């Protein structure tokens, strides 16, 4: 059972996961190691800057490792750390909850898809 006297314990992870693309990015990385270009294609229409910013944050927080492979062409791969993989059961629980109770949640507190697309195109 959750200790309700310390709600601040989850605030840092909730703050980090808040925002456009972060959850979708983690969902994609749960499927294995990905190159930057693969992530861009899977998360279209994410901008390169936004993807770079999100990946850097995940790397800074110890959830993702970034491996550079020299050569021509140079390529970079991203992979979840053990800590990042530890989030997977939480995501699976959210997915299961959405399947059972999530009908009609598409346009709620987070705004509409149009608002998110406008935000992304402004970057």
Image (cartoon, rainbow, N blue to C red):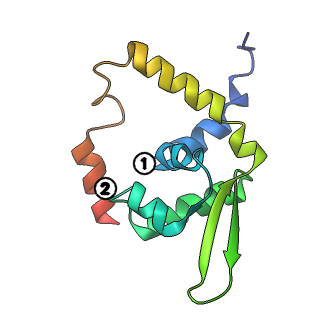
**Quarter of image, res 4:** top right
Nearer to me, 120 or 24? 24
Give 83 or 13, whichever is nearer the viewer: 83
Q: Which picture quadrant has residue 9? A: top right
Q: Name the residue under label 1.
A: 20
Q: Quadrant of the N terminus?
A: top right
Q: Nearer the viewer, residue 40 or 2?
A: 40
Percent of width and height locating residue 20: 42, 48
Q: Assess disc 1: are there few (<14), some (14-19) or many (≥20) residues with their C-alpha within 10 Å of its C-alpha.
A: some
Q: In this view, does 92 lie to the left or right of 42?
A: right
CA distance for labels 1 and 2: 9 Å
Where is the C terminus found, in terms of image quarters? bottom left
Question: Residue at position x 68%, y 30% from top?
Answer: 10
Residue ranking furthest to the top? 1
Task: Residue at the far bottom: name it.
Answer: 72
Q: Position of residue 90 (x, y in %)?
A: 62, 28
- Mark 1 touches mark 2? (CB < 8 Å): yes
Label 2: few (<14), some (14–19) or many (≥20) C-alpha neighbours in 10 Å: few
Q: Residue at x 71, y 59 (%)?
A: 60
Question: What residue does disc 2 label?
Answer: 119
Q: Residue furthest left?
A: 114
Q: Is mark 2 on a helix, strand or loop?
A: helix
Q: Which residue is drawn at 36% across and 36% down?
A: 110
Above or below for 75 versus 106: below
Position of 41 relative to 90 (above/below): below
């Amino acid at each position: 059972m959750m200790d309700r006297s310390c709600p601040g314990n989850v605030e840092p992870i909730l703050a980090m996961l808040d925002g456009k693309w972060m959850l979708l990015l983690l969902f994609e990385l749960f499927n294995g190691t990905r190159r930057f270009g693969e992530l861009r294609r899977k998360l279209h229409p994410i901008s390169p800057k936004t993807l770079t910013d999100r990946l850097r944050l995940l790397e800074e927080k110890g959830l993702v490792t970034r491996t550079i492979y020299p050569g021509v062409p140079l390529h970079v791969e991203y992979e979840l750390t053990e800590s990042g993989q530890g989030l997977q059961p939480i995501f699976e629980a959210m997915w299961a909850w959405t399947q059972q109770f999530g009908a009609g949640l598409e346009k709620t507190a987070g705004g509409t898809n149009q608002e998110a697309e406008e935000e992304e195109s402004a970057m």
